[in-house]
Image (cartoon, grey):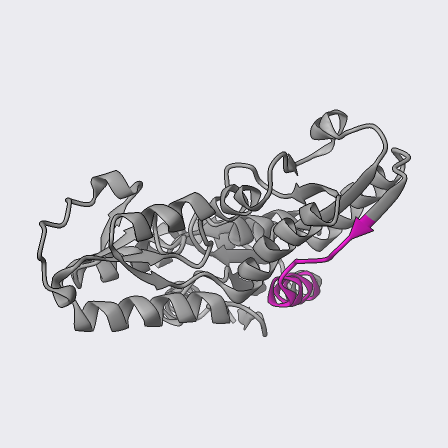
Amino acid sequence: MKIIVSEKCGFCFGVEHAIELAEEMLAQRQDVYCLGSIIHNKQVVDRLAQRGLKVVESLSEIPPTPPNTPQDAIPTVLIRSHGCHPDTMAEIARRGLRLADATCILVKRAQKLVRELHEQGYQVVVIGDPDHPEVQGAVGYAPGVTVVADEADLPRLPAGGKLAVISQTTHSPADFSRLVGLIAQRGFDELRVINTICRETARRQDAAVALCGRVDVMFVLGGRNSANTGELAQLCRRQGVTTHLLESSGDFDPAMVSGAKTIGVTAGASTPEWIIRDFVERLRGATKGRG
């Protein structure tokens, strides 16, 4: 039995920065709140919660700060790597809360582009998941932004005029290209396309595809609510290889590798190295003596 771990998998630099900032804030302060899960990985979120990180879905869940509260006792709001709506940033300032911004630099670039393209007279389109926090934040940087998740959304685009298209940073490059091609057929006076997909996302997907051609079964490790992890799993399945998406080694069943001679392992950008390592050890134990 042979186990091959993808050359590109696990934490990306944006996730590493967010976790490091959270740990730094927790070491310095008592009240640190994160708007939503800092990353889409339950194990990491639970570990930070044990150290005191409080996850809230809105600023209204943070208790008001009494007047004359010392500066070092004012709660800190941590913006996760996905970023947030600009109205949220304004509300944090209005409430007098401290801000720790862990927004990925690539997400910040996409947010800036939405604003600049609108100012240049373009109708802005974001290709991605409308329910993803990154997309929900980015659309706040200009009025009338249209989110396109699939072909069914294309009729909502304007007829003619100037259109600018960007992507959710963790979106599939292949799907982005496909949808841009369909948009280009709709006859706009001017069409500008800017590829805002994270290169690390593309590299991880390319490495996973290459690995699929060498294995009998593929495991993708990561949170089930992680966009990039889900994209990885779908991509692997499209290669025709049996693919299992697991959050941790606890989800593994030895029957998943029955009859397999070579096993592939990859992981989403929010999956820590220790989860990958634990899973590989679990695999080795389950397949010991099988060649």
Q: Give the quarter of the image for residue 135.
A: top right
- Residue 248 pos. (x, y %): 37, 56
As drawn, 170 above or below 274? above
Residue 207 placement: quadrant:
bottom right
Pinpoint residue 120: horizontal percent, then vertical percent. Answer: 74, 49
Q: Residue at coordinates 62% horizontally, 50% vertically from top-left?
A: 115
Residue beneath the point at 90% across and 36% down: 185
Query: Does the magenta stretch mainly form a helix, a strand or a loop?
Result: helix
Q: Residue furthest front?
A: 68
Q: Residue at x 56, y 42 (%)?
A: 139
What number of labels is visible?
0
From this view, report whether residue 242 is shown above or below residue 187.
below
Left or right: 207 with respect to 32?
Answer: right
Q: Where in the figure is residue 249, as x and y percent of width and height?
A: 36, 58
Q: Is residue 29 visible?
A: yes
Instruction: Please tell me whether residue 207 is drawn above or below residue 123 in the rendered image.
Output: below
Q: What residue is shown at x 60% (from left), y 57% (from top)? A: 112
- On the image, the x and y values in percent for residue 156 come to 72, 26
Decide which of 178, 140 is in the foreground and name it: 140
Q: Is residue 43 left or right of residue 214?
A: left
Q: Nearer the viewer, residue 208 or 10?
A: 10
Near-viewer residue (164 or 186): 164
**Span highlighted in magenta in the image:** 192-210
Q: Nearer the viewer, residue 63 or 116?
A: 116
Magenta stretch: residue 196 in it? yes
Q: Per the image, is 266 magenta?
A: no
Quick check: can you spot residue 35? no
